[in-house]
Amino acid sequence: VGNYMLFLTLIQIFKGLFPGLQHKVYVSNFLRSDWPEDCGNPAVKPKTPTQRVVNGEEAVPHSWPWQVSMQATLLPPIPYLHNCGGSLIHEEWILTAAHCFIPLNKQSLYRMCLGKHHMDSSMDVPSVEKCLQVDEIIRHEGFVYEQDPSDITYDIALVHLSEPVNMTREISPVCLPKPGAVMPAGTPCFVTGWGDEKGRHILVLTASNASLNQAALPVIDFQTCSKPSYWWDTLRPSMICAGYESPDELKSACQGDSGGPFACSVAGTWEVHGVVSFGPQGCIKDKKPSVFTRVSAFSHWIEDSIRKFCLNGFLHRCY
């Protein structure tokens, strides 16, 4: 509370010193249930239930309007390639995985594309794709996977867009869950992305005819998923497991979906409860379900990161 009041005081001082400068600063409580007010309510309703991503179920076009295609280039003007998914949580903010920025971690190499169904947007008629540049990448300070590949905790990141995206029928944000919220075991939530439908180990998908896929994966409780025959000590309470146990029911989120949303319907509103983090090589394996960063474990980090960004940079635009 003290830091928040200090923030407001500094803003008032700044406005007093520069009364003629048009400047809008985001100061509202980031985790209010109505922020943004129209989140988690797609104009095009998704198809539920659904089949697996591996061996594939195509999503209804634009029924997951917060889905982001994160695209990177080694060096402009080399074409951008899809490398990860993400979730639009605000007109200026994308939620994704920290490992998506290995080895490229410069914001100038990335763009965020929304409103896509096919990877080749020219196949979407009419195309409503909107790609925006990035001016900040915030990875969790506890993410040490680059130094210690055995530790993939804190696999979460925020991306700030260089300009606000206009909300449309095909582009709108997903809601954040309440802090600490844990979905009950067996709850079917949805993973979406342009990942490898065949279960091969690939990191970048470039097939122009690839369309957005979806799969319903039931949540697996922490006690089960942390057993030695499952993920054991790799799993942390800040993660979510989801998938099927029987070999003939295997469904999964593949590597191409890294950073993408794991969305759950809560009282009719879609919330992003997970960020695709890791899974077994080849995407599917008995007792090795998909693992997601649990967003509700990082509610305060998300809030603090956005406030720090606004405070540190409040000589430039911050909504």
Image (cartoon, rainbow, N blue to C red):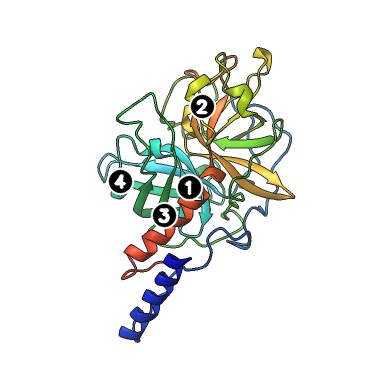
Instruction: Give x and y (percent) for residue 283.
Output: 52, 21
Q: Are marks 3 and 1 in contact (CB under 8 Å)?
A: no
List the single residue furthest toward the front: 2
Which tag, 1 or 4, sits closer to the chain's start?
1
Mark 2 sits on what residue? 235
In the displayed structure, does residue 65 sit left or right of residue 307?
right
Rounded to the nearest angstrom, the CA distance separating label 2 from label 3 is 25 Å
Which tag, 3 or 1, sits closer to the chain's start?
1
Relative to 37, is 9 above or below?
A: below
Mark sitting on residue 109: 4
Q: Nearer the viewer, mark 3 or mark 1?
A: 3
Mark sitting on residue 124: none
Q: Which SS class for mark 1?
A: strand
Which tag, 2 or 3, sits closer to the chain's start?
2
Label 1 crowd bin: few (<14), some (14–19), many (20+), radius 10 Å? many
Q: Tell me the amino acid under the disc marked 2.
A: Leu
Q: Tell me the amino acid under the disc marked 1.
A: Leu
Instruction: Give x and y (percent) for residue 97.
Output: 44, 39
Residue sitting at 61 percent across and 49 percent down? 177
Label 2 crowd bin: few (<14), some (14–19), many (20+), radius 10 Å? many
Which tag, 1 or 2, sits closer to the chain's start?
1
Q: Are marks 3 and 4 in contact (CB under 8 Å)?
A: no
Q: Are marks 1 and 4 in contact (CB under 8 Å)?
A: no
Mark 1 sits on what residue? 95
Which tag, 4 or 2, sits closer to the chain's start?
4
